[in-house]
Amino acid sequence: MTTKIQVVFYSMYGHIYEMAEAVAAGAREVADTDVALYQVAELVPDDILEKSGAKAARAPFAHIPVIAAEQLKDADAVIFGTPTRFGNMCAQMRNFLDQTGGLWMSGGLVGKVGSVFTSTATQHGGQETTITSFHSTLLHQGMVIVGVPYSEQGLLNMDEITGGTPYGASTLTKADGSRRPSANELAIARFQGRHVAEIAKKLAAK
Ligand SMILES: Cc1cc2nc3c(=O)[nH]c(=O)nc-3n(C[C@H](O)[C@H](O)[C@H](O)COP(=O)(O)O)c2cc1C
């Protein structure tokens, strides 16, 4: 039986997209998984995206399809990626989740695995609050939350500035967005994808 994994993200400048590809690659390492990447719909007007440089930064992932809320019910596991906005998920992700009322009413996501990864500009800019506050929505939906256990040794790395939390993978972007996900952060992201896929596979087999 194939385990269906969705990686659902929003990214304005591509950091979360890079992490999403690493998460998806990790999930693909598990046999018999079908892994699909989706982005959530944009809310920022086009001219503002153009002025901020976000439009150009997003060209590499413009081909990733925009997901409709109803599609979530096709997955065994959903791994969500969101940049932080003031220590919370971004509005685009919140807007997407707020369209899952029908799934909430029908119990469409109950028992599926849910997992979250994030990015911040600064080292202490709210990675953990972004992920754990996201978890409330997943719990209301009846999802089974999976993070990143310390068996992923990258979480213990103190030799460099790095993201990575037991709640989910993370990256640091710098205020000007010039820092890209590091090897350690991408390894943790791959671990998260693989770990979620392994657990989803076990749950789906029951
Ligand atoms: C409105 C707004 C609020 C933000 N709030 C925070 C914050 O609280 N802490 C922080 O470290 N970075 C903050 N950032 C920076 C973003 O998290 C950063 O640009 C993002 O993680 C980059 O990921 P992306 O390239 O995938 O969009 C904020 C950015 C914006 C536009």
Image: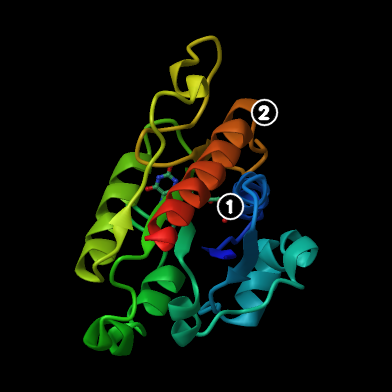
Q: Residue placed at 51% from the left, 79% from the top?
A: 43
Residue 26, horizontal then vertical, whole percent: 63, 44
Furthest-top residue in view?
159
Quadrant in the picture for the N terminus: bottom right
Q: Quadrant of residue 187?
A: top right
Q: How is the image coloured?
A: rainbow
Q: Quadrant of residue 99?
A: bottom left
User: As drawn, is 100 to the left or to the right of 65?
Assistant: left
Residue 190, horizontal then vertical, whole percent: 60, 40
Give whichever of 83, 192 is nearer the camera.
192
Mark 2 sits on what residue? 183
User: As drawn, is 125 to the left or to the right of 54?
Assistant: left
Q: Amino acid at mark 2?
A: Ala
Crowdedness of circle 1 by 10 Å Cα count: few (<14), some, many (20+)? many
Q: Residue placed at 39% from the left, 78% from the top?
A: 95
User: As drawn, is 144 to the left or to the right of 173?
Assistant: left
Q: Amino acid at mark 1?
A: Ile
Residue 14, horizontal then vertical, whole percent: 66, 54
Q: Is residue 39 above or below residue 33?
A: below
Q: Residue placed at 48% from the left, 40% from the top?
A: 169
Residue 174 seen: no
Q: Is mark 1 within 8 Å of ligand 1?
A: yes
Quadrant in the picture for the C terminus: bottom left
Mark 1 sits on what residue? 16
- As helix, strand or loop, the secondary structure at mark 1 comes to helix
Q: Quadrant of residue 138?
A: bottom left
Residue at mark 2 to residue at mark 1: CA–CA distance: 14 Å
